[in-house]
């Protein structure tokens, strides 16, 4: 199969590219290398992390229809994994229009081209953020998600609605993956693990929101990639699927594991809850388990792997 990964220089996209290549697929990457975080990290994922991996790279934007037309005509894509998006809850509060343009209009373009070029399966990134302030835990795909509490979450809910329309009208197979707090080597600098590790190593204070009364299903990137590949191979007519770790971890425990691996205690500043954030995200992953997937990496191993990478990449 020839598979297009949008956001291919991103954290999840680059890891997925590696796995697809290793199993024999042709990989085409699309990324605009924007400056939401340091583009050098994206460039290094391409040059260093994917060294020795064969792929085609297109530098362009999913909002650019003329660019997309040229790409699709040239490449004869079989399947799409659409990961390109503006990420992050807090940044979306300051830049809601940008999130609409990229996440909603950009996804609309990708769906249009998927239908036009008879794509066999369209797998895309949704988010656990769509659950908003739902009180029932764990979060199930059957739960109501009509009350997002950030522009980012609203854009991901919109993506699920867009995909449903295209599956219903054009019979395009689509699966949305609601990611739960992805982490690991080569991760995004705006994520908590990155910031905590950096500040603890530098002896700076870390901000612990909701006074530490937070919990998450942290999901290691290798588990995310195996889940993406599982649904990519299924060609479901339409679905939305949770993909998260199988253990609810307290934020305080998460910090402790970082401390253990760094060998330093954190200086903690307890902070109130941030706008748009939620105290707990816990995934009901039974649907994806029934497809043969299961998460295998605990935070003790995942954080150890991340910190080993971080120290090699930033401290050597």
Image: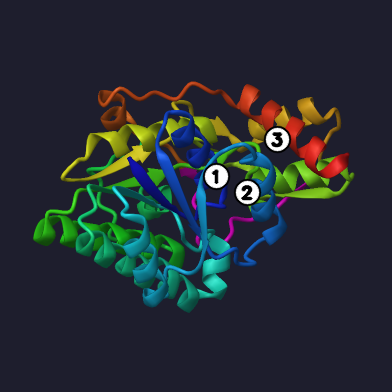
Q: Is residue 295 left or right of residue 250?
A: left
Residue at position x 82%, y 41% in the image: 200
The numbered mark, 1 or 3, whose residue comes first in the sequence reads 1
The number of discs equals 3
The numbered mark, 2 or 3, whose residue comes first in the sequence reads 2
Is 272 magenta? The answer is yes
**Mark 1: few/some/many CA within 10 Å (<14, 14-19, 20+):** many
Q: State the residue position of label 2.
A: 46
Front one among 228 and 284: 228
Front one among 60 and 287: 60
Quick check: marks 2 and 3 in contact, CB under 8 Å? no
Residue at position x 52%, y 36% in the image: 18
Rendered location of residue 85, percent (x, y): 47, 61
Residue at position x 31%, y 64% in the image: 158
Which labelled disc corresponds to residue 255? 3
Residue at position x 86%, y 32% in the image: 264
Rendered location of residue 55, percent (x, y): 51, 46
| Residue 70 to residue 197: above or below | below
User: What secondary structure is the stretch in magenta mostly built from?
Assistant: loop
Q: Is residue 47 left or right of residue 296?
A: right
The numbered mark, 2 or 1, whose residue comes first in the sequence reads 1
Write down the region rendered in magenta: 268-280
Q: Nearer the viewer, mark 2 or mark 1?
A: 2
Q: State the residue position of label 1.
A: 14
Between the residue at mark 2 and the residue at mark 3, the CA separation in whole angstroms equals 30 Å
Looking at the rendered structure, the secondary structure element under dot 1 is helix
């Amino acid at each position: 199969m020839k598979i297009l990964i949008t956001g291919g220089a991103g954290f999840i996209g680059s890891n997925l590219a590696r796995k697809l290549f290793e199993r024999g697929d042709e990989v085409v990457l699309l990324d605009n290398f924007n400056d939401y975080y340091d583009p050098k990290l994206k460039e290094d994922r391409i040059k260093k992390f994917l060294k020795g991996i064969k792929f085609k790279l297109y530098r362009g934007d999913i909002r650019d229809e003329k660019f997309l037309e040229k790409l699709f005509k040239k490449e004869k894509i079989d399947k799409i994994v659409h990961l390109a998006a503006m990420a992050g809850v807090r940044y979306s509060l300051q830049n809601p229009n940008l999130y609409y343009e990229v996440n909603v209009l950009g996804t609309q373009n990708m769906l249009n081209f998927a239908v036009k070029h008879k794509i066999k399966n369209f797998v895309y990134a949704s988010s656990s953020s769509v659950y908003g302030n739902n009180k029932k835990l764990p979060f199930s795909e059957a739960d109501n998600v009509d009350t997002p509490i950030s522009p980012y979450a609203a854009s991901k809910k919109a993506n699920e609605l867009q995909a449903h329309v295209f599956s219903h009208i054009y019979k395009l197979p689509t699966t949305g993956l609601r990611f739960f707090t992805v982490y690991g080597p080569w991760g995004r600098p705006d994520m908590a693990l990155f910031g905590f590790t950096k500040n603890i190593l530098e002896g700076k204070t870390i901000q612990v929101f909701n006074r530490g009364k937070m919990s998450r299903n942290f999901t290691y990137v290798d588990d995310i990639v195996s889940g993406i590949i599982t649904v990519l191979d299924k060609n479901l007519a339409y679905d939305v699927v949770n993909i998260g770790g199988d253990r609810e971890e307290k934020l305080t425990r998460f910090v402790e594991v970082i401390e253990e691996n760094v060998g330093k205690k954190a200086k903690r500043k307890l902070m109130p809850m941030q706008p748009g954030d939620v105290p707990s995200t816990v995934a009901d992953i039974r649907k994806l388990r029934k497809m043969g997937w299961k998460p295998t990496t605990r935070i003790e191993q995942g954080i150890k792997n991340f910190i080993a990478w971080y120290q090699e990449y930033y401290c050597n």
